[in-house]
Structure formats: C-alpha cells, structure tokens
Image (spheres, rainbow, N blue to C red):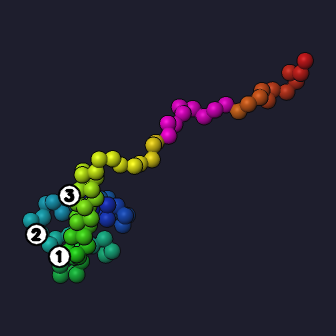
C-alpha cells in the first residue's frame, strides 16, 4: 500500500491510516500527510497524475517483455559471503618467545 508508506514517512502509524481508508466507502477519501488529516483528495488537489502512472506501467511492461523474449541475459554473479570473518594472522600473545 503506497498510502501506508506515505503515512509512515510522515511520522504516523501507516496501519491505522490504511485501516481508516479501507473503512471509507468514498473513493476520493484519503489522508493528507502534509496536514495530518483525512480529506477529499480531489477537492484538496491531491491527485496522482495519470501520465506518470501510465509511463511507469509502460516502462515496466517493456522491460518485462524484453526479459521474456531474450535468450540470454548478462548479470553480475553474486559473491558468496563467508560465514565468519577471517582471523588476523599471528598470535599477539606477548612473552611467548623461545
């Protein structure tokens, strides 16, 4: 839920905000994070530009289509991480000279 993340970023509990939004039957009802209040988002001028959403979906579909139709893809091979860091060399215990 993007509304949850917006609420969290504004310093409020996102779960409570999303719960109140789901209880509402009004499709324009939403949370104005800047003012910290629930309002009619269309009347407040808070709208999601259609062009931005459309371009994001088109770009995602384009990339997905390219990945599906390619026969090979180049990616970085992940490096295996060791379970524990290596121990430093040498003893470091003084007074053990022979």
Mark 2, residues whose alpha carbon is within 10 Å: few (<14), some, or many (≥20)?
A: few
- Return the disc, 3 or 1, that comes first in the chain's sequence: 3
Dot 2 or dot 1: first in sequence order is 2
- Pick the quarter of the image with the N terminus: bottom left
Residue corresponding to mark 3: 19
Write down the region rendered in magenta: 79-87
As measured in the structure, the alpha-carbon distance from the residue carrying label 2 to the one carrying label 1 is 9 Å
In the rendering, at what x and y percent does residue 12 appear? 34, 62
Q: How far apart are the alpha carbons under marks 3 and 2?
A: 14 Å
Q: Is residue 6 left or right of residue 40?
A: right
At mark 1, the secondary structure is strand
Residue 59 in the image: x percent, y percent? 27, 65
Q: Quadrant of the C terminus?
A: top right
Tell me if residue 90 comes above or below residue 53 in the rendering: above
Camera-nearest residue between 61 and 85: 61
**Percent position of residue 46, x then y:** 24, 77
Instruction: Give the residue at x 24% y 50%.
Output: 68
Residue at the extreme right = 98
**Which of the 4 image quarters holds residue 85?**
top right
Residue at left offset 20%, top offset 74%: 50
Q: Any magenta on residue 65?
A: no
Q: Are marks 3 and 2 in contact (CB under 8 Å)?
A: no
Residue toward you, 16 or 46: 46
From the image, tell me which residue sits under label 2. Answer: 26
| Residue 46 appears in the rendering | yes
Which tag, 3 or 2, sits closer to the chain's start? 3
Mark identifier at residue 40: 1
- Residue contact at pointers 2 and 1, CB within 8 angstroms: yes
- Left/right placement of residue 74 relative to residue 62 reads right
Question: Which residue is at 14% across, 72% downward?
Answer: 28
- Secondary structure mostly seen in the magenta stretch: loop
């Amino acid at each position: 839920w993007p509304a949850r993340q917006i609420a969290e970023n504004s310093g409020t509990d996102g779960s409570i905000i999303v719960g109140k939004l789901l209880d509402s039957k009004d499709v324009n009802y939403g949370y104005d994070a800047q003012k910290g209040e629930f309002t009619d988002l269309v009347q407040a001028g808070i709208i999601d530009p259609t062009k931005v959403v459309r371009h994001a979906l088109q770009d995602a579909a384009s990339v997905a289509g390219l990945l599906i139709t390619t026969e090979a893809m180049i990616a970085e091979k992940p490096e295996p991480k060791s379970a524990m860091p290596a121990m430093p060399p040498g003893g470091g215990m003084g007074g053990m000279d022979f």
